[in-house]
Image: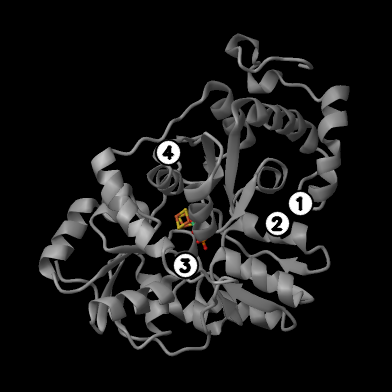
Amino acid sequence: MDGMNFSDKNQCPEADALVYDDGVKARVDHLYERVKDVVTPMEWPKFAPLVDAILRLKQERGATILAHNYMTPEIFNCVGDITGDSLKLAQVAAEADEDIILQAGVHFMAETAKILSPNKTVLIPDMDAGCSLASSITGEDVQRIKAAYPDLPIVTYVNTSADVKAWSDICCTSSNAVQVVESVARQWGVDTVIMIPDEYLAKNVAAQTDIKILTWKGSCEVHEMFTPQDIDDLRAAHPDAVILTHPECPPEVMARADFAGSTGAMAGYVKDKSPAKAILITECSMSDNVAVENPDVDFVKPCNLCPHMKRITLTGIYEALRDLKHEVEVDPVIAQKARASLQAMLDLPKATTPPSFETGKDAVAVPYVAV
Ligand code: 13P
Ligand code: SF4
């Protein structure tokens, strides 16, 4: 494969024909050092030729890879250019210099990148990498909510389709949800805000603010699986561990944790505090990626896999860059309206470190919208 010109598609081998030869070893084996605690020596010979080919294709194509914190460690650590939580990836997508953005994440993230960078080519390795939150609500649902509550602002989680964003007033992520709710309530001069579609995020935000919240019956299929009993059992088994949860978890789970925040906030906490032992109540790859950065922290890993995130593989990334597929398109009219909701969020002051949620709070009543 040495000297191969990837611009000529006929010269690009199938993924399984890539071999772990001396050239590949010389070029990428140093990367194994970084991931050796989370990628086995048996796996590396399969990953290395793909990593090598992806790094070369990225250069040839002028592409950048945005990798979410839930990507597997060989993607996150070996080929990702920008890594982080949903907010950071959205901010970077809006400012990227490269002509091609490859989203190593799920479809709503790629769509967000396309909305914010309409003139760029945005690729996703698997168009079916969805999200239970994004599929819980449609643009028509939001139009019905708007008609029923014309005087209340609609705050929409970024984990939604472009069409849903288009009918919303402002977007939020788990990194800025409380800030967005409070600022939009101030701006509209109201004491109640509609926050869709994640009922758990809405309830967790409601416990942090005096603003009243109405929500939608949507949830993350990964985080809703964690129960208060899980946390009690983990606490009993590991009394010396710090327990961190994501705000997509049910409120009774978050209330029992020591820390709660977005994936970026969780990673920041572990880096800053360097606890002896940590338990991240979230998607499985997160602990592996945070462990790479924090080799002295002992991680207990009671995680749930996101089947959508796991559709993104090194093979898929290689084929996407090789064949310039699968291109994410958004209807320009919808994109323009969705961009206004995203931009309203991005225009808020940026926090220097992702803010956390206070844990141990009592549950607050958060009704569903009546539509
Ligand atoms: P954050 O990275 O914004 O915390 O989001 C988590 C998530 O579930 C994305 O799918
Ligand atoms: Fe969606 Fe949950 Fe998977 Fe994130 S972890 S993509 S919110 S299903």
Q: CA distance from mark 4 to mark 1?
A: 26 Å
| Circle 2: residue type | Asp
Residue highlighted by disc 4: 128
Q: CA distance from mark 1 to mark 2?
A: 6 Å
Q: Nearer the viewer, residue 112 or 226?
A: 112
Q: Residue at x 62, y 78 (%)?
A: 233
- Relative to 56, 348 lies left or right: left
- Tell me if residue 247 can be seen: yes
Q: Residue at x 61, y 12 (%)?
A: 8
Query: Assess mark 1: CB under 8 A from ligand 1?
Result: no
Q: CA distance from mark 3 to mark 2?
A: 21 Å
Residue highlighted by disc 1: 38
Q: Residue at x 66, y 69 (%)?
A: 268
Image label count: 4
Residue 288 image label = 2
Residue 298 locus on image (x, y percent)? 78, 69
Q: CA distance from mark 1 to mark 3?
A: 27 Å
| Circle 3: residue type | Ser
Residue highlighted by disc 3: 174
Q: Considering only order in the chain, which callout, 1 or 4, is on the residue closer to the N terminus?
A: 1
Please say if the residues under marks 1 and 2 sit with CB atoms less than 8 Å apart.
Answer: yes
Label 2 sits on a secondary structure element that is: helix
Q: Quick one: quadrant of the C terminus? A: bottom left
Label 1 sits on a secondary structure element that is: loop
Query: Assess mark 3: CB under 8 A from ligand 1?
Result: yes
Q: Considering only order in the chain, which callout, 4 or 3, is on the residue closer to the N terminus?
A: 4
Label 3 sits on a secondary structure element that is: loop
Q: Nearer the viewer, mark 3 or mark 2?
A: 3
